[in-house]
Image (tube, helix red, strand yellow):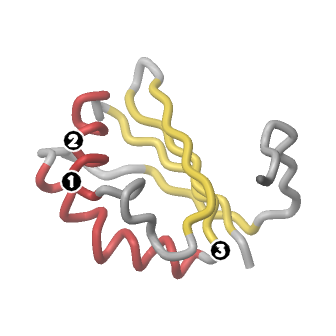
Amino acid sequence: MAVVMNLEWDGVTREQYEAVRKSVDWEGKPPTNALFHVASFSDMGLRVTDLWQSAEDFQAFLEKRLTAGVKEAGIQGEPRVQIYPVHNLFTPGFRAL
């Protein structure tokens, strides 16, 4: 079952996020069953919303790739992560090729 993962990580900067992107290379080597990723920043820090085929897929990416990239970027603290089953998905801006 598809899930949405919401992450809030106070104190994470744009520079740190970009360092993790480069290190983990999730755009060049997409994680298995990752469907959607959007990152934004508030005054508090990083905010991420992902769509995954399953919570287990996200957990595998976290353990196998993301944790090392976060450590390498020197990010401190712990994020607040919430995972929910997807009830509906509508993407009017996306048109399949």
How many residues crowd around disc 3 within 10 Å: few (fewer than 14), some, or many (20 or more)? some
Q: Nearer the viewer, mark 3 or mark 1?
A: 1
* Quadrant location of the N terminus in the rendered image: bottom right
Label located before the other in sequence (3 or 2): 2
Residue 72 rendering spot, x and y as whole percentages: 11, 53
Q: Are the residues at dot 1 and dot 2 in contact (C-beta closer than 8 Å)?
A: yes
Label located before the other in sequence (3 or 1): 1
How many residues crowd around disc 2 within 10 Å: few (fewer than 14), some, or many (20 or more)? some
Would you place residue 94 above or below residue 44 in this image? Answer: below
Residue that numbered label 1 is attached to: 23
Residue 93 rendering spot, x and y as whole percentages: 81, 37
Q: Residue 8 — which label?
A: none
Q: CA distance from mark 3 to mark 1?
A: 23 Å
Residue that numbered label 3 is attached to: 53
Say which quarter of the image contains residue 25: bottom left
Q: Nearer the viewer, residue 16 or 80?
A: 16
- Disc 1 residue type (three-letter): Ser
How many residues crowd around disc 1 within 10 Å: few (fewer than 14), some, or many (20 or more)? some
Would you place residue 78 above or below residue 33 in this image? Answer: above
- Residue at screen point 78% across, 44% down: 94
Q: CA distance from mark 1 to mark 2?
A: 6 Å
Residue positioned most to the front: 97
- Residue at screen point 53% across, 81% down: 56
Q: CA distance from mark 3 to mark 2?
A: 26 Å
Residue that numbered label 2 is attached to: 19
- Residue at screen point 78% across, 64% down: 86
- Disc 2 residue type (three-letter): Ala
Q: Secondary structure at mark 2?
A: helix
Residue 61 rendering spot, x and y as whole percentages: 39, 72
